[in-house]
């Protein structure tokens, strides 16, 4: 018991005993030592130390090992019940859609169909196109340097396109 009401404990205290810091990581042996030791143990078998017995031999208990057979009847019963459950589940999946109504299934309609397209002939709403002449002038023959130029090829294409348009209109 402490004498009197003291605010500060002045009794002699023990010094704490230092505790060793735990090592959480285990230091492993170098891999080559472990490999060579395993190889040596594999190739050269050591003699095992003789077994030290500390008790005297006793008589063997004959009744420890009771002869029992495998429960074949229960195995067969388990297989039959499992097959019945599997067949019942399979039958239920085939029969269930006919017993309960199904959720309505969403069927997406095609947005565009070929029969929705309406074709109009241009002559119904446009006057005939007048190009100013009945026939396009024939291109004149050009020399080789002129045939390779871009402007020549452009004029040639334009002339071909005009002829095709005139043929379609007539």
Image: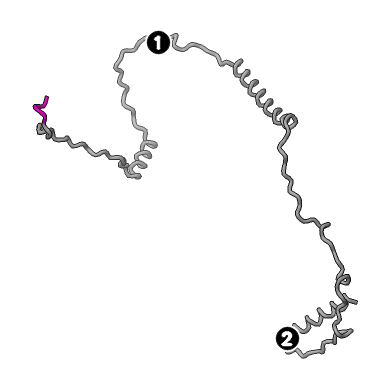
Q: Furthest residue to the front?
A: 5
- Magenta part, dominant SS: loop
Image quadrant where residue 78 sits: top right
Q: Secondary structure at mark 2?
A: helix
Q: Is residue 64 left or right of residue 55?
A: right
Q: Dot 2: within a 10 Å radius of its alpha carbon, few (fewer than 14), some, or many (20 or more) residues?
A: few
Image quadrant where residue 39 sits: top left
- The numbered mark, 1 or 2, whose residue comes first in the sequence reads 1
Q: Is residue 85 left or right of residue 125?
A: left
- Coordinates of residue 9 in the picture (x, y in percent): 12, 33
Q: Secondary structure at mark 1?
A: loop
Residue beneath the point at 86% across and 81% down? 130
User: Marks 1/2: CA distance?
Assistant: 116 Å
**Of residues 8 and 149, which is closer to you in this image?**
8
**Of residues 11 and 159, which is closer to you in this image?**
11
Q: For mark 2, what is the residue?
A: 151
Quarter of the rendering occupied by the N terminus: top left
Q: For mark 1, what is the residue?
A: 60
**Of residues 52 and 170, which is closer to you in this image?**
170
On screen, residue 146 above or below 161: below
- Coordinates of residue 127 in the picture (x, y in percent): 87, 76
Residue beneath the point at 18% across and 37% down? 18
Quarter of the rendering occupied by the C terminus: bottom right
Q: Which residues are magenta?
A: 1-5
Q: Is residue 135 magenta?
A: no
């Amino acid at each position: 018991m402490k004498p009197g009401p003291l605010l500060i404990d002045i009794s002699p205290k023990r010094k704490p005993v230092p505790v060793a810091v735990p090592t959480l990581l285990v230091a492993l042996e170098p891999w080559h030592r472990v490999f060579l030791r395993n190889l040596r143990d594999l190739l050269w078998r050591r003699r095992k130390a003789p077994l030290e017995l500390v008790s005297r031999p006793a008589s063997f208990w004959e009744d420890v090992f009771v002869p029992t057979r495998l429960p074949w009847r229960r195995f067969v019963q388990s297989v039959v019940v499992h097959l019945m459950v599997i067949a019942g589940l399979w039958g239920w999946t085939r029969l269930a859609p006919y017993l309960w109504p199904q959720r309505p299934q969403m069927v997406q309609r095609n947005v565009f169909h070929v029969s929705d397209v309406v074709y109009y002939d241009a002559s119904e709403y446009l006057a005939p196109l007048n190009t100013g002449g009945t026939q396009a002038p024939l291109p004149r023959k050009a020399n080789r340097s002129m045939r390779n130029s871009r402007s020549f090829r452009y004029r040639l294409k334009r002339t071909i396109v005009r002829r095709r348009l005139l043929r379609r209109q007539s």
